[in-house]
Image (cartoon, rainbow, N blue to C red):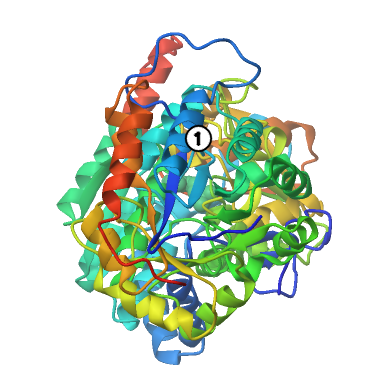
Amino acid sequence: MATIIHPAEQSEAASNTPGRFGAYGGRYVPETLMAALQELEQAYAEAQADPGYQAELASLLKDFAGRPTPLYFAKRLTESLGGAKIYLKREDLLHTGAHKINNALGQGLLARKMGKRRIIAETGAGQHGVATATVCALLGLECIVYMGEEDMRRQELNVLRMRLLGAQVRGVTSGSKTLKDAVNEALRDWVTNVRDTYYILGSALGPHPYPTMVRDFNRVIGIEMRQQILEKEGRLPTAILACVGGGSNAIGAFHQFLGDKAVRLIGVEAGGRGKALGDHAARFSGGSPGVLQGTYSYVLQDEDGQVSLTHSVSAGLDYATVGPEHAALHDCGRAEYVSADDAHVLEAVVKLARTEGILPALESAHAVAECMRIAPGMASHDILVVNLSGRGDKDMNIIARELNIQGAQGL
Amino acid sequence: MAILFQQHPGLVVYLTAGDTGLSPRLTHAAAEGADLSATRDIALAAIDAGADVIELGVPFSDPLADGPVIQRASERALARGTRLKDVLALAKELRAARPHAGLVIFSYLNPILRFGLSRFADAAADAGADGVLLTDMIVEEAGEYLAEMKRVNLAPIFLAAPTSPDERLKAIAEHSQGFVYAISRTGITGKQQSVAADAAALVERIRRWTRLPVAVGFGISNADHVTKVGEFADAAVIGSAIVELIERSTEEDAPGAVARFIKGLRQPYPVQAL
Ligand SMILES: Cc1ncc(COP(=O)(O)O)c(C=O)c1O
């Protein structure tokens, strides 16, 4: 019987127990969900070995979603920062506007294969909700998306998109009315309707097998990235940067490089508006190990184990825990985790828009901000690859409002 | 101490510790820690009215297995500053006042982990609790938890669900002590119209693996439900119905209201040896 609540026991990111990443991960869920999780685990294993399933997924990723995404040399950004050479992995060019479609397609096909026709999902920024609604439209499945009311307000465009796509968006009013609360509500729905419902979780978190499965569906990012940088530069990058909400785009970008010890892996969390608990979503600097929403990982919590509120200008990173594989990578030192605050993130949005003509999602702009911070101090032969997880169209209202407050020019 | 159901069916009463409902008394003496006297008074009244076991619920910020009633109670309890150590102090007080009542600490895992599993086990045992029920702890992950419960001689109580296949029920039955908690239906906590048909079948399946008493909970809200549960199980767990009653009552009236409610739950029924 697995018995791991001690973070200290293992330091390797990989452990032999399925669903465990070092000490982290596992399944801490109401018993009612256990049969469904075991069924999912088995169905996923079968799908991985099923050439028909794999071929359909590959074909949809290519012709429907638009893979492979380009690896783009950001020449003007590089010149303007005057240090490392910067490449952007263009997940923002995917259909629906973010990497979230990689996972939604994989899980949507799996749900159909399992004969489940009622799909539920949670969403923060609305990108996973839009991706799920899109896949459900494509496959003819019923779709219900839980979204915190605060997020519905700040990502209204995505709410409209989901509804146009035929999904039902259910507002969540508990807690801070953001992503964590949407996950709680989706889990409550799943516990209630578990026999006929498939839960498409949108990031590499929650109980096993989700962290592994969602990572696998996003590994394509790193696989392409590796091949593309070798083609363009003949060598691996100095560092890869990705924003970390639940951690799906980051683990997808990092995974293929875990064995390349010379490649630095840098995850960027939401620094929000300050260092006090409640003002940010930097789980690694401000949190401690705990169990939230089915998994053991770093959690922003008070001394009584009550989960803290979080803040970020980006809804997609505004979350109190992080995928367990990142917790393991953090503890063993294979990946570094830093944070970018709201102000620097907005600066990064403007910078990328005006040097490259690319408007990043606020989430992705966290990785751009860290890149802007470290690139100038690096040598010209250093290579940074930023995973640009999504595009910023959805954020135009927030960006315009925030920049006006700060008196930026020209907006 | 042990968990004993004196009458049939036994009654297990869940209370969110620290919740005083929507109409709390205006002044609470500034005690050390949060003032849980309201929960104490309700628990004592419940025991005296015939509750065999009190489940003291530790409020949690993210109660994902709970419906709106217990969610609201948790929010109120947290807003009043209720902490795990206060709940443990309350358990100790209840044990001293009612030596023979069954006492179970009911919690989500994270507050316990944060407190320290081992420290919690010691404190719960010292308080005189009989058992512990963790909503989001499944048998596969429970190695260390079980070892701690064993060390301090506390009963670990696991939940069994209608969706649990037989091999899971077997493990749940083997690792539980005190009683096995059968969830009446797929879903979260909350009242419902009738006892789900799932419940009887689940209890029957559980009994293949254990001679422990089986308590049925989730949705049990009135005397009819309790009678129905008594036909196939050893005890009924009443949660949301009582938490909602407390929500609607003034703090002064809550103990009396809960006592009347509990007395009304056991309709005349032949007393049976378990
Ligand atoms: C564009 C984009 N990037 C990143 C994220 C954060 O999620 P994750 O950390 O799982 O990649 C989101 C979530 O909504 C997103 O929309």
Camera-nearest residue between B115 and A389? B115
Looking at the image, which residue is at 41% across and 48% down?
B50
Looking at the image, which residue is at 55% across and 21% down?
B35
- Left or right: A355, with A228 as reference point: left
Residue A185 placed where, x, y %? Answer: 36, 49
Does A44 appear above or below A238? Answer: below
- Left or right: A16, with A132 as reference point: right
Residue A139 placed where, x, y %? Answer: 24, 73
Residue B111 occupies which quadrant of the picture? Answer: top right
Q: Quadrant of the C terminus of chain A?
A: top left
Looking at the image, which residue is at 31% across and 48% down?
A146
Does A285 appear above or below A212? Answer: above
**Dot 1 falls on which chain?**
B
Residue furthest front in the image: B270
SS category of the residue bearing label 1: loop
Looking at the image, which residue is at 34% across and 30% down?
B256
Residue B255 placed where, x, y %? Answer: 38, 30
Residue annotated with mark 1: B17
